[in-house]
Image (cartoon, coloured by chain):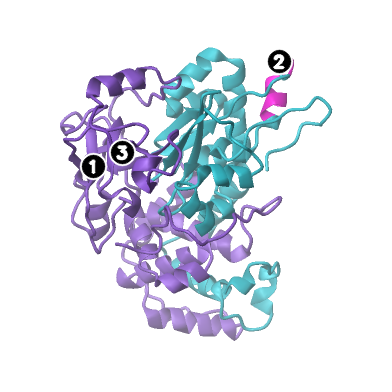
Chain colours: A cyan, B purple
Amino acid sequence: MSSHRHDDNDHDHDHNAPDTGPTLRVKALETLLVEKGLVDPAALDALVDTYENRVGPRNGARVVARAWVDASFKARLLADAVAAIEEVGLAAGPQGEHLTVLENTPAVHNMVVCTLCSCYPWPVLGLPPVWYKSAAYRSRAVIDPRGVLREFGFDLPAGVELRVWDSSAELRYMVLPMRPAGTENLSEDELAALVTRDSMIGTAVVTYSRDAAARPAK
Amino acid sequence: MNGIHDMGGMHGFGPIVRERDEPVFHHEWERRMFALAIAMMGNRTFNVDQYRQAIERMPPDQYLATSYYEHWLFAFERLLIEKGVVARTEIDVVMAALRAGARPPQAPVVKAENAGDAVESSKEAAGLSEALGGGARSLRYDESYRARFKEGDRVIGRNRNPVGHTRIPRYVRGRRGVIYRDWGVFIFPDTHASGEGANPQHCYAVEFAARELWGGEYPADERVYVDLWEAYLEADGEAYSRDGKSSKSGSRKAIAQGRAAKPVRVRGVKKSAPPREDA
């Protein structure tokens, strides 16, 4: 079934050759549940639209940038992230009801995993990337976190305490990365553009070079 | 259950493969699968713990050979059949009709008794106007459930191996840790999944030294924090050592001092906050 992974022609399957894979089975289940009156196709469309287009790591990046420029907001964020993210226009929706923000400092680096499934703070980061859900990341993050960070291109300096958070219950974690040097004159929006998704999982740090244009989050 | 899903600390899965400019969904069926599952949790056909358990019941070889949303599809279909929402024969009939390029016949499909309410609930889930109804919602601020442990208490992850759903990873069972935070009262996933009730109890962030989990050759300055329900924990008479050394010289006072020196103190929601509407 994994051979379907890179097939981009799913839209055409209704008209093409018979398909015994997940495309057909999901279509059958949706058809049945709609006809039984249990789900509304328009509601499904709205859910897809929300998570594909409206919720994502740009949300978390706005939170991080605000925390970098506003010390009192940062204090509120670390004390009660669920309430604080409302200040930047976000709401603690599904998988964010119990959000906690973990601050990285020169002395402590935090990174987040879910070894049992793929728990992830949807309201601030959206749905997780495939690598976060992979056996490789889930198995290694707790036993070889420095090795994982090296694979992401980041050598954690000696003497920095490394804290790995396994999201095994209903708490959800987002990392507040350190603000890179040389960004004192950047606006909040420019800062937000520097913040990557991986830096908010804790598998990367935020970097800045004056020459490079602001890059969108991966 | 001691399933393949419980992967923390396993070896052999290789490097972490990342995709550049990865889309949110890779296929149209993944979009529909995601939305269907959220909608059916929203209308309380099943709860999140039942859903997780259904994924865990996938045969291990199949689990490793399939993608994330294929896990969802396996669990979703299984739960719908087990709960009597759809019959296997109905799925077969509709799949055959779709394969033949036909609109599926309307006649064999029986309207669900709760059709009207269910579709309203799935719309609410889509509007995200409230937390998903089927989730392991917390009673976080309920003072009537007393906490057995407090921050700084030394604990041991219970050596328990239930065949049903549980959220204590194998790698902390029998391991010594210290209560780092009391997160408040949450519905207990083991009984929530089995239909034996909410069994609300405190859930704690428990700090484990990497050396306690993995052995003395692992770094002294690494720790793993695992969120564990009270039933997963027992009191530990031994001293907890932050760097995982098996010394008995540590005292709670020393631990408290060490903790006070930590540069970061993450604080959650204040205990005095009002109860949530959905508690």
Looking at this view, is B195 or B228 the one in front? B228
- Measure how far apart labels 3 and 1 are at the Cα level: 32 Å
Q: Which mark is residue B278?
A: 3
| Residue at numbered disc 2 | A184
Name the amino acid type tagged 3.
Answer: Asp
Residues tagged by mark 2 and mark 3 found on one chain of the structure: no
- The residue depicted at 39 percent of the width and 17 percent of the height is B261
Indicate yes or no whether the magenta region holds residue A186: yes
* Segment tinted magenta in the rendering: A184-192
Name the amino acid type tagged 2.
Answer: Glu
Looking at this view, is B73 or B8 the one in front? B8
Indicate yes or no whether the magenta region holds residue B151: no
| Residue at numbered disc 1 | B156
Asked if the residues shown at circle 2 and circle 3 are in contact, with their CB atoms under 8 angstroms apart, the answer is no
| Earlier sequence position, callout 3 versus callout 1 | 1
* Location of residue B145 with respect to B85 vertically, above or below: above
The spot of residue B257 in percent (x, y) is 32, 17
Secondary element at tag 1: strand
**Which of the chains bears the disc numbered 2?**
A
Secondary element at tag 3: loop
